[in-house]
Image (cartoon, grey):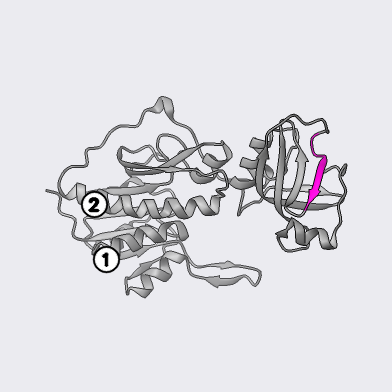
């Protein structure tokens, strides 16, 4: 039987919060939380604590925010807590082998994909961009590679046609917390055998880039819909209306032959704009024009009338 009495949790953003909360609700003894340093956020660039730090502070858990994670001093400080296991969820840094192997039971990770698919920093976004119908959570034993450790437990999550990165991440974060406490219980009963990843099935999920945001209307409506949803909330897909950028939201693919050139505004209605693509057409129900707030198409048209035939570039 594996003794798991003391745990150190490592995580930083909103995605990691449900995992920590699930552990606390499950009665786990989290002796410390490690997250990245406070950073400026928002228009005012006010320094704010990471979401995981906020939760840990509310529960009186010591919070550590190291600048460097590879120093001997840092390893010594971690060792002083006497943790049996480290749990990592979206910490945001590559962790060295000596740190991963510091506790007797090593380090396990809550990863946002069905490994070995989508290894890397943006698994939720990349699954959406690729048009996957399903993704999931993997609980894995961490090694020094990029999400290459042995798989311990998995859970599947359907991707709905209207899911964005924001909505899908919320569902997956909740699933991650549920799976993690299941994994801890199974580990205590020695019923969590590891299995190797199939390298032949491995794919990468690199960080997003602003270069991926411009919309090419010659692509299919399905591909553009995936782009809009996968890049929401960042960096947000955009096209151009005249000399200003325009961000479309809440896309819906409309199947059927299109005669107009890709990027042409086919129909203007209160419920949305229908735009021609390289295959099928796309209904866009919300938009944001440069310098304006995001709004429904109906609200936008009251101040910015548009006519069919207009070409988005």
The percent position of residue 222, horizontal first and vertical second, equals: 64, 36
Tag 1 residue: 31
Q: Tell me the magenta residue range.
A: 262-269
> Dot 2: few (<14), some (14–19), or many (≥20) neighbours within 10 Å?
many
- Classify residue 278 by image quadrant: top right
Q: Is the magenta stretch mostly helix, strand or loop?
A: strand
* View extreme (left): residue: 1
Check disc 2 and report its element: helix, strand or loop.
Answer: helix
Name the residue: 76% across, 55% down.
270
* View extreme (top): residue: 200
Name the residue: 75% across, 56% down.
297
> Dot 1: few (<14), some (14–19), or many (≥20) neighbours within 10 Å?
some
Name the residue: 87% across, 44% down.
310
The percent position of residue 267, horizontal first and vertical second, equals: 81, 44
The percent position of residue 260, horizontal first and vertical second, equals: 83, 33
- Classify residue 301 by image quadrant: bottom right
Report the front residue among 18 and 269. Answer: 269
The percent position of residue 199, horizontal first and vertical second, equals: 39, 27
Which labelled disc corresponds to residue 264?
A: none
Check disc 1 and report its element: helix, strand or loop.
Answer: strand
Q: Which of marks 1 and 2 is nearer the N terminus?
A: 1
Q: Indicate yes or no whether the magenta region holds residue 265.
A: yes
Is residue 46 at all visible to an observer of this figure?
A: yes
- Classify residue 173 by image quadrant: bottom left
Tag 2 residue: 184
| 243 lies above or below 62 | above
State the count of labels.
2
Name the residue: 34% across, 41% down.
154
């Amino acid at each position: 039987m594996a003794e798991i009495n003391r745990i150190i949790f490592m995580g930083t953003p909103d995605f990691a919060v449900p995992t920590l909360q699930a552990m606390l609700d499950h009665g786990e003894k989290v002796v410390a939380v490690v997250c990245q340093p406070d950073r400026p956020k928002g228009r005012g660039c006010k320094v704010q604590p990471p979401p995981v730090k906020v939760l840990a502070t509310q529960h009186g858990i010591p919070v550590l925010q190291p600048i460097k994670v590879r120093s001997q001093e840092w390893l010594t400080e971690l060792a002083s807590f006497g943790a049996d296991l480290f749990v990592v969820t979206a910490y945001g840094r590559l962790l060295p082998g000596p740190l991963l192997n510091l506790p007797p039971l090593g380090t396990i990770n809550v990863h946002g994909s069905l490994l070995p698919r989508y290894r890397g920093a943006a698994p939720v976004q990349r699954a959406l961009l690729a048009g996957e119908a399903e993704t999931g959570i993997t609980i894995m034993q961490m090694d020094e590679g990029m999400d290459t450790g042995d798989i311990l437990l998995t859970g599947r999550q359907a991707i709905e046609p209207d899911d964005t990165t924001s909505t899908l991440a919320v569902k997956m974060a909740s699933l991650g917390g549920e799976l993690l406490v299941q994994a801890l219980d199974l580990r205590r009963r020695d019923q969590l055998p590891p299995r190797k990843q199939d390298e032949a099935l491995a794919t990468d999920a690199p960080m997003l880039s602003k270069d991926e945001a411009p919309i090419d209307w010659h692509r299919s409506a399905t591909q553009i819909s995936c782009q809009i949803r996968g890049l929401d909330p960042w960096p947000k897909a955009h096209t151009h209306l005249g000399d200003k950028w325009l961000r479309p939201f809440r896309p819906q693919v409309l199947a059927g032959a299109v005669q107009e050139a890709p990027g042409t505004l086919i129909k203007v209605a209160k419920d949305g704009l229908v735009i021609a693509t390289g295959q099928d057409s796309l209904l866009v129900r919300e938009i944001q024009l440069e310098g304006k707030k995001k709004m429904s198409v109906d609200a936008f048209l009251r101040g910015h009338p548009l006519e069919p035939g207009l070409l988005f570039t």
